[in-house]
């Protein structure tokens, strides 16, 4: 399933670039919705992100993964930090990691390396230093 998911992500990024001339960066698409930019495609894309997992699980009969044990305040703080980071980096993992690296963008390679390093540091601190 991870391979199929990766292929679908790559194909959707390629289709977005080929059909609309746009980079598939989720933070940019979401920011465009918040800024009330025109284009029904933004709403359709976000609706697909939200609806695809439950529709897949309903159609396949596979059980959905159990929710994590994180508290709502922690989830909200984490979401705000991710949003802040994506604005500072000029994009998110989908824009930089999927589309930017595929275009051999040095800026995207640096941003993706930073995302990965920050994730590794966060896991280390939360699992080994705070546990």
Image (cartoon, grey):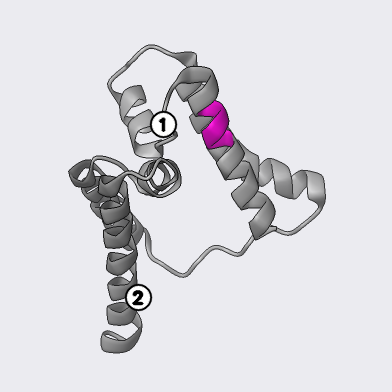
x 54%, y 63%: residue = 67
Of the pair 26 and 56, the residue shown nearer to us? 26
Q: In the image, is residue 102 above or below residue 48?
A: below
User: How many numbered discs, if any?
Assistant: 2
Side (left or right) of 9 relative to 39: right
Circles 1 and 2 in contact, beta carbons < 8 Å:
no
x 60%, y 64%: residue = 66
Query: Label 1, label 2: how many angstroms apart (C-alpha)?
Result: 29 Å
Q: Position of residue 60 (x, y in %)?
A: 80, 49
Side (left or right) of 10 relative to 94: right
**Residue range of the region highlighted in magenta in the rendering:** 12-16
Side (left or right) of 22 relative to 114: right
Q: Quadrant of residue 88?
A: top left
Q: Position of residue 92 (x, y in %)?
A: 34, 45
x 24%, y 40%: residue = 90
> What residue is disc 1 on?
23
Farthest front residue? 104
Look at the image and tell me in which quarter the C terminus lies.
bottom left
Instruction: Look at the image and say whether residue 14 sits in the magenta stretch.
Output: yes
Instruction: Look at the image and say whether residue 101 sits in the magenta stretch.
Output: no
Q: Earlier in the sequence, mark 1 or mark 2?
A: 1
Q: Position of residue 109 (x, y in %)?
A: 32, 53
> What residue is disc 2 on?
123
Of the pair 1 and 130, the residue shown nearer to us? 1
**Secondary structure of residue under mark 2:** helix
């Amino acid at each position: 399933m991870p391979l199929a998911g990766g292929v679908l992500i790559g194909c959707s990024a390629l289709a977005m670039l080929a059909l609309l001339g746009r980079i598939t960066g989720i933070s940019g698409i979401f920011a465009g919705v918040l800024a009330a930019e025109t284009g029904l495609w933004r709403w359709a894309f976000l609706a697909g992100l939200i609806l695809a997992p439950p529709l897949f699980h309903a159609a396949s009969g596979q059980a959905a993964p159990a929710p994590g044990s994180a508290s709502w305040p922690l989830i909200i703080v984490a979401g705000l930090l991710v949003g802040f980071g994506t604005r500072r980096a000029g994009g998110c993992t989908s824009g930089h990691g999927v589309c930017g690296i595929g275009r051999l963008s040095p800026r995207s390679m640096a941003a993706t390396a930073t995302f990965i390093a920050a994730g590794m540091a966060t896991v280390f601190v939360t699992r080994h230093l705070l546990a």
